[in-house]
Image (cartoon, rainbow, N blue to C red):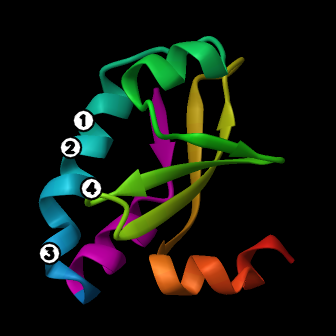
Amino acid sequence: MRILGRDTVQAFMERYPDSESSLKSWVQAIEANSFKHLNELKQTFGSADYVRPYIVFNISGNKYRLIALVNYQIGAVFVEQILTHREYDRGKWRK
């Protein structure tokens, strides 16, 4: 799949260097696959959750949350934002 929003990923890694290896692994796994639906995606990312309309990925052992829109038809993942767990729990990203 193709990733849109790499600048968001890069900026987050620069701000939180401890996320770098996990985010790079996430990028590799996304790019190496052509997910056709959520069930296929969850086979690779078991902790990914569908929170309409987003897919929320746990990063770095649930320390961070990557929020993305996934378009299975065109094979693209749009990275909306990456948050610390605390920021995610505040819920402002849902608005």
Instruction: Say whether residue 9 is left or right of residue 82.
Output: left
Question: How far separated are the C-alphas under marks 4 and 1?
Answer: 9 Å
Q: Where 80 sits versus 13, above or below?
A: above
Please name the residue shown 34% across and 77% down the image: 12
Q: Amino acid at mark 4?
A: Leu
Q: Which residue is mark 3?
A: 18
Question: How far separated are the C-alphas under marks 1 and 2?
Answer: 5 Å
Report x, y in % for residue 18: 14, 75
Report x, y in % for residue 89: 62, 79
Magenta stretch in the rendered image: 1-14
Question: How far separated are the C-alphas under marks 3 and 1?
Answer: 17 Å
Q: Is residue 31 magenta?
A: no
Q: Nearer the viewer, residue 53 or 77?
A: 53
Whichever of labels 4 and 3 marks the residue nearer the N terminus, that label is 3
Q: Which residue is mark 1?
A: 28
Q: Amino acid at mark 1?
A: Gln
